[in-house]
Image (tube, rainbow, N blue to C red):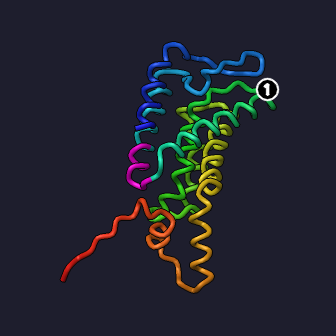
Amino acid sequence: MLLLLLGVVMLACYPFSTHLFSSPLHFNPLFMLAHESVTHLAINLLSLLLVWLISRRTGTRQGRLLLAFFTASLASLTMAFMFNLPIIGSSVGIYAMIGYLLPEMVSLAPLSLSYPAMSLLLFFESGITSKAWEKLFHWFGLTAGTVMHYMVDSRRLKLIKQMTNMGLGFDMYAVLGAAYPERTKLVYRLK
């Protein structure tokens, strides 16, 4: 629900934030919700919808995804100030949420394949961004979200390590059930 609310806020702020780049000379607090064009807004809203659907499927908390969105956007603002670059932060935040979800989808593709594939897609996209620094900001968001997932979700990594060290083997569903009992539903069947 929080992600859909973020989409409504981005849609409502669009008329006030069109072409509203934030730079060291012209700081603007709405840079996180700004978009270059209607196409840029539509792509970000579609991406946000897909992130919401995947988060519901994987059971990822939407509050954590919002944390990734705002943290990566603010960190990219710091980078923009350091290198004197203009920035629009909503795309960076969306890519951070995608990066946060990549480790959650290990049943579909391992992180060692999905992260490089997303990185290559970012660098070879030409329709959305044409400037190299915009692609680097998007890649920064993807990387920040992936790293943030492992920083926030270290409890599961510790359980995986403990189970592997005890010789129990690696069963992703057992680890998820041990790490997140509130997400796991037990079904008992009577014979």
On screen, 43 above or below 165?
A: above
Q: Dividing the image into 4 quarters, which one contains the N terminus?
A: top left
Q: Secondary structure at mark 1?
A: loop
Residue span colored magenta: 52-59
Residue 144 percent coordinates (x, y): 65, 46
Q: Quadrant of residue 50?
A: top left
Looking at the magenta stretch, what is its main secondary structure? helix
Q: Residue furthest top?
A: 16
Q: Quadrant of residue 124?
A: top right
Left or right of residue 105: residue 132: right
Seen from the viewer's position, the closer of residues 191 and 99 is: 191
Q: Residue furthest right?
A: 82
Seen from the viewer's position, the closer of residues 8 and 80 is: 8
Residue drawn at x 56%, y 42% as measured from the top left: 95
On screen, 168 above or below 188?
A: below
Residue 4 percent coordinates (x, y): 41, 34
> What residue would you read off at disc 1?
84
Residue drawn at x 74%, y 27% as measured from the top left: 85
Q: Residue furthest left?
A: 191
Left or right of residue 18: residue 60: left
Q: Dividing the image into 4 quarters, which one contains the C terminus?
A: bottom left
Residue 126 magenta-drawn? no
**How dense is the environment of label 1, judged by Cα within 10 Å: few (below 14), some, or many (20 and up)?**
few
Residue drawn at x 42%, y 60% as measured from the top left: 182
Say what amino acid the circle numbered 1 marks: Asn
